[in-house]
Structures are given as C-alpha cells and as structure tokens.
Image (spheres, grey):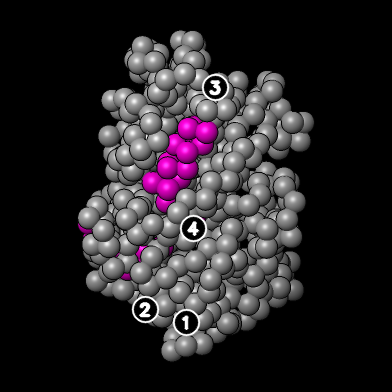
Amino acid sequence: MKRLTLSLVSALALAAATPALAQSINIGHLADYSGGTSDVGQPYGQGIQDTIAWINANGGVNGKKINSDFNEYGYQVPRALAAFKKWVGTDKVVAIQGWGTADTEALVGMVTKEEIPYYSGSYSASLTDPVGKVNAKSERAAPFNFFYGPSYSDAARAMVQWAADDWKKKGKPGKPKWVHMGANHPYPNSPKEAAAEYAKSLGFEVLDPITFALTPGDYTPQCLTLKQSGANYAYLGNTAGSNISVLKACKTAGVDVQFLGNVWGMDENAMKAAGEAANGVVFPVRTAVTWNGSAPGLATAKEISKISDPSGNAYRPVHYLSAICTALYMKEAMEWADKNGGVTGVKIRDGMYQKKDWVPKGMDGVCNPSTWTATDHRPTTRVDLYRSVVTGPTDASVADLVKSGAIKLEKVATIDLPRKTELQGW
C-alpha cells in the first residue's frame, strides 16, 4: 500500500473527529482583510470563521452543517453588493455575517426584501429600528439587521457621559469642549449627531468636526487644528489604523486632550503599534472580559481559537471575542428556527426574539446579556468603557506585552443609558 500523504492523514483525522452532519445551512460571510478597516476587520473576521468551523466540528446546528461562503471584499461597497447578489441568486443563503457600515446600510432594503438576517460588524444606530419611523429621527425600518453590543451612538453617548463625569471629578471650571474627529464616511459619521446633541444637553461646547481619512497618514495638520481649538475631549471615529497615526502625530505636536475611541478605534494590537501615544485612550469594549481575563466562557473561546491556532498560544484582541459572540447568537437562533418550522430567514429572525438577557451557551462571563425584540434591535444600552494603559516599550509580541503588563486594558466605567424610544434608530 502506498504511504498516505501527511495532508491526507490530517484530512482523515479531522473527518473522524468531526461528527457526520446531515444537510447544510448556507450563509454568506463578508470580511475586510485588505481594505481601509482591515486592521480590525481581520481579527473580527477570523473570529467568525473560527466559530463557524468550531460549530461544525461540534455537532453543527442540530446536526446540520453551516456552509459559509467567505468573501474578502476589501471594504468596497460594489464588491459587497456583488457578493450579496451571488448569495441570494446562486447560494440561497439564509443568513449573512456582514461587516462595514457603508455596505450594511446600502444593503438594508435588499436584506429586508429577501428576508435574510444580516449580522453586521457595523453597530450603526440606524440598524436598530425594525419597525421604521419609531421616532422623528429614525428614517427607516431594518427588520432583518442585527449586531451584538451597544450601537455606535449609544457608545458615543456613554463616552460623553463619562467625559462629563470626568470633567466634574477633576473640578475643571467652565464648559468642557467636545470635538468629533474622523473621515467623512458613513461609519465615523454614524454617531456624530447623537454624540453632539447629548454633549450639548450635558453642557459641553461642541466644536466643528476635524476630518482625517480612514487610512494611515501624516495628520500633523489635524493635530495642530485640534491643539488650537482648545478641545478637552476628542472622539476618534475611525478604526485603529488611522487613529494610530493621529495619536502619534498629536503626541509629537504636544496636544493635551483626552482621546476617546470608537469601538473599532482601539484594541491591543493598536496599543502595541501606537506605543506610548495610545496611553489613556478610553473606548468601549463589547464583551465582559478580555482575553487574559477570568470567566467560564473563556474556556470555550480558547477552544474556538485553536481552530486557526492549534498551539493555543495566540493572544486574541477584543474584536475576536465579540465575533465569537455574534456567530453564536446566530447559531442559537438557527437552532430555534430548526425546531420551529425550519431554518429560513424569517424563522432565524424570530429566533432572535425568543430570549431575554441572553448569553450563548458556554459563553458565561464573556458575552454580555443581550435582548432583541420585534420593535427594538438594540441588544443593550449598557456600555463598558476601558482605558488603554501603556507603561513601557511595545516592541515585543502582544501576548508578551500583556503578560508583562506593558500594555493592559483597565475598566473605568459602566454606563447604563436609558432605553428611550426617542434615542432609537439614530
């Protein structure tokens, strides 16, 4: 008998270890590994991929395999639209794991028409009104759009609240000044109005926004403008890649301001890349713990991580954990659908409404309790805020930096926002 190749032996071993799964459930997976948000898109997308593979290796959805068609679209809306057309026309998908705000918002009407639950990496508040016109500022219905974690707008409101408390705690005189910084793009613009209005209501002076691109670059002019403005609190609306450039340029320019980051605006990888310039940035984290924390559900997360890191040594940033939660919410909604008429888009959507304060099985202490209803797709209005702490050189690996304490994420506040209908959808 000819000697089996190593790859064939591995394939046979995997097949033997994986339960036989009947039928399949087709989904689409849109990810940015090469475009303007790839710095955070890659760990999030990897988390989705690993979780889907782990689900299939552990019984699937009531014995059914999830067949995920991966599409790396480079953060380009036309490519996202083309992928959607294929998924609907050829693949007959029943759900999609999506990504960016521009493409997610562009697809809302089509997703609604085709009745396909769309789990995005965009937390735009415009996706949280399933009914439409729930208030004067909510402009459209998004009955098939879901995400895990607070919306961009609620996260920004929470940071405004934290800033107001911080200002009082420090005993500063006069009105604090708030400024929005980011690209003129649907993603950073999403929470701009919500944050500005909330800031005004809490006594802030809201300054004119400062624009900088989604890609890394020399943002010294923007930092000089920021310095001259006298801003006290600056919200960075872009992802970490371009924010790193701003943080470094502003440190060089001697800007004295408290930076606040969008949920995608900072993570452990960005702390390593920005070094001392990242020290002190406050931003929201969607999960109850980070990778080196303590929670029963981390054991599940670390088994999922072994799908792409068999050694188990990789340190996963906060975005990877939130992806796991997102994929597992979809999986459990599919399980309910399977037992209640079949795994269709409508039934998966209805499955999202079956539990209150919901944590996926095996993820206790990691995924924050979430609730979706037929009239409100805000999973939570509770926002956990963390501060990035950098205490030394950051030229080692992220895992080593975390282990040594050179970088760490320090929880500074939990802000409970009122679940007001007038704040939904914007």
Residue nearer the viewer, 38 or 203: 203
Residue bearing the label numbered 1: 337
Residue 343: percent from left, percent from top: 44, 81
Residue bearing the label numbered 3: 171
Q: Distance between the residues labelled 2 and 3?
A: 53 Å
**Residue mark closest to the camera, 2 vs 3:** 3
**Residue mark closest to the camera, 4 vs 3:** 3
Residue nearer the viewer, 118 or 160: 160
Residue at disc 4, secondary structure: loop
Residue bearing the label numbered 2: 346
Please state the extent of the stretch shown in magenta in the rendering.
Answer: 139-165
Residue 235 versus residue 324 in the image, above or below: above
Residue nearer the viewer, 139 or 145: 139
Q: Can residue 9 be seen in this view?
A: yes
Q: Was residue 386 drawn as part of the magenta stretch in this picture? A: no
Q: What residue type is labelled 2?
A: Val
